[in-house]
Image (spheres, helix red, strand yellow):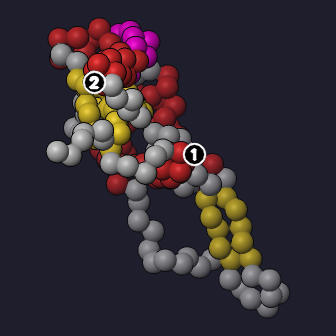
Amino acid sequence: MTRSGGDFQPRPLKRLFTANQCWTSFLDAGGLRDIEVEAVTKMLACGTRILGVKEYNCDKPECPHVRYVTNSCGSRACPSCGKKATDLWIATQLNRLPDCDWVHLVFTLPDTLWPVFESNRWLLNDVCRLAVENLLYAARKRGLEPGIFCAIHTYGRRLNWHPHACACVSDLRRSE
């Protein structure tokens, strides 16, 4: 078997979960939701033989080269697969959205409410709706009709629980 592209480089997030039995400790401690366990399990299996392998051979019978390619997990939470899905989503949106400048807005929740949303995640569905309703209300008062797309993010940059809504709004500011 030959490998192209140099030596194998383990995925950094995978190393973080597997170093010093971190993931095993989290599992043993309990308190994780099934969806979290499933996402991490998929991510840890991604790119390994656990998910299966495809074998590619040269068309020439005398050629000894064989290439094995491991299957990916396809999980949105996987840094490798999720990045591909995100890039595809962005490309699709860019084809759908008007070609204009966009403004990124973040709607945060007071940290005193975070435990309420963590225990009642279904409430997060309303956060985007309320953010968009408020943006539309403010824009319509000024006679404007913006383009808006919004997403819920449940974790911050430090991977801590930090529910917030991110909205992208077409930039309707008028030059003077």
Question: What residue sits 38% from the left and 32% below the top?
Answer: 146
Question: What residue sits 48% from the left and 50% below the top?
Answer: 94
Residue 123 shown in magenta: yes
Viewer-nearest of labels 2 and 1? Answer: 2
**Magenta region:** 118-128
Q: Secondary structure at mark 2?
A: loop
Question: What residue sits 61% from the left and 59% below the top?
Answer: 70
Q: Taking 65 as reference, is 6 left or right? A: left
Q: Which residue is mark 2?
A: 142
| Count of labels in the image | 2
Q: Earlier in the sequence, mark 2 or mark 1?
A: 1
Residue 11, quarter of the rendered image:
bottom left
Q: Which residue is mark 1?
A: 74
Magenta portion: prevailing SS class = helix
Residue 61, quarter of the rendered image:
bottom right
Q: Position of residue 6 (x, y in %)?
A: 45, 78
Q: Secondary structure at mark 1?
A: loop
